[in-house]
């Protein structure tokens, strides 16, 4: 009975979050870049805690660039595949009906923002780049990657994070109404696990791997975080390897934070629109390199050695010394 009461309260909390009223989204910039002859979709791809938010915020601080007024829109990407057991979608799951629905959401947000460039960032898309490309084949991709050992420490904090109602409510605005009961129940179960479990973590967090439950049963939390990072990086890299030139640009997190103006300029050149040096400098003002190496240092020697066994080949391929 106690568990039922807790679940009911959590369900009502979720419903209340969805019902919250937010101001209508306004584009971050009102100027229009004459260099852009047509509308553009830009998809940021990256494992969680790899700088995807930082990159999105920098891009959307530039004139003529907009995004959704929430962190991610995984609810939109999963509509029509709601009960698929993971985020590792294959391209055939992008049926005509599903593609039409997702594209309508892009078109609505771009129209609403009034800007020619729409940026989207959902970390789970790192597991399903081919699916995303099937939905928006005209989009360009910006792929950011980071040292996996730094990612692990940051990801572990999210697995153990407390409830953030404003964050949840912003995302809940974009839950399709028909999917609301499913997500409300799922969220309640996740929070109930966090409250009652002795494991001191959520039941799930971040991009859902096809074998996530078996990984959680077999590995420690830091090992699961490392494997989650590895799967995101490897899946995305495999998809990008088959794409034509001019479709994707790869960005190293450590290089971006070390020289943010130069790296953002490289991205805008790739996307094909000009930005003033002053705009670029202003866009990267919050960027600092202070977190480089911080996560790795927080791990013990034993943990670093164990994680190197699990993901060392991916670290090496990306140029990180395990």
Image: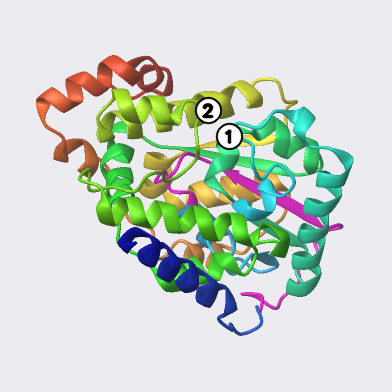
Q: Residues within 10 Å of mark 1 (few under 14, many from 20)?
A: few
Answer left or right for 98 relative to 177: right
Q: Secondary structure at mark 2?
A: loop
Which of marks 1 and 2 precedes in the sequence? 1
Image spot of residue 248 (x, y percent): 66, 35
> With respect to residue 295, does 101 lie above or below?
below
Q: Which residue is mark 2?
A: 210
Residue at x 24% of width, y 30% of height: 220
Q: Secondary structure at mark 1?
A: loop
* Quarter containing the C terminus: top left
Q: Are marks 2 and 1 in contact (CB under 8 Å)?
A: yes
- The magenta region covers 26-52
Q: Nearer the viewer, residue 252 or 181?
A: 181
Q: Main secondary structure of the magenta part?
A: loop
Answer left or right for 165 relative to 296: right
Residue 85, labelled with which disc?
Answer: 1
Asked if residue 43 is among those painted magenta in the image, a careful observer would answer: yes
């Amino acid at each position: 009975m106690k568990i039922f009461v807790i679940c009911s309260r959590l369900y009502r909390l979720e419903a209340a979050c969805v019902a919250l009223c937010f101001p209508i989204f306004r584009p971050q910039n009102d100027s229009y870049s004459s260099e852009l002859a047509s509308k553009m979709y830009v998809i940021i791809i990256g494992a969680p805690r790899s700088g995807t938010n930082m990159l999105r915020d920098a891009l959307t601080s530039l004139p003529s660039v907009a995004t959704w007024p929430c962190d991610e829109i995984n609810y939109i990407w999963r509509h029509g595949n709601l009960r698929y057991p993971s985020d590792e979608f294959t391209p055939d799951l992008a049926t005509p009906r599903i593609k039409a629905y997702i594209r309508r959401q892009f078109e609505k947000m771009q129209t609403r923002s009034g800007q020619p460039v729409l940026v989207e960032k959902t970390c789970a898309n790192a597991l399903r780049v081919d699916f995303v490309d099937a939905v928006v084949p005209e989009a360009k991709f910006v792929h950011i990657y980071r040292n996996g050992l730094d990612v692990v420490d940051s990801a572990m904090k999210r697995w153990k994070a407390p409830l953030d109602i404003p964050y949840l409510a912003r995302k809940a605005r974009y839950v399709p109404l028909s999917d609301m009961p499913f997500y409300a129940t799922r969220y309640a179960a996740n929070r109930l696990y966090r409250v009652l479990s002795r494991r001191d973590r959520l039941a799930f967090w971040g991009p859902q791997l096809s074998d996530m439950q078996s990984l959680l049963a077999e590995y420690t939390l830091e090992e699961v975080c490392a494997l989650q990072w590895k799967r995101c990086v490897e899946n995305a890299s495999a998809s990008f390897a088959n794409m034509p030139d001019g479709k994707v640009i790869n960005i190293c997190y450590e290089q971006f934070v070390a020289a943010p103006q130069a790296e953002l300029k490289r991205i805008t050149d790739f996307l094909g629109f000009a930005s003033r040096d002053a705009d670029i400098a202003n866009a990267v003002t919050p960027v600092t390199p202070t977190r480089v190496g911080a996560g790795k240092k927080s791990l013990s020697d034993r943990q670093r050695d164990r994680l190197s066994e699990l993901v060392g080949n991916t670290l090496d391929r990306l140029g990180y010394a395990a």
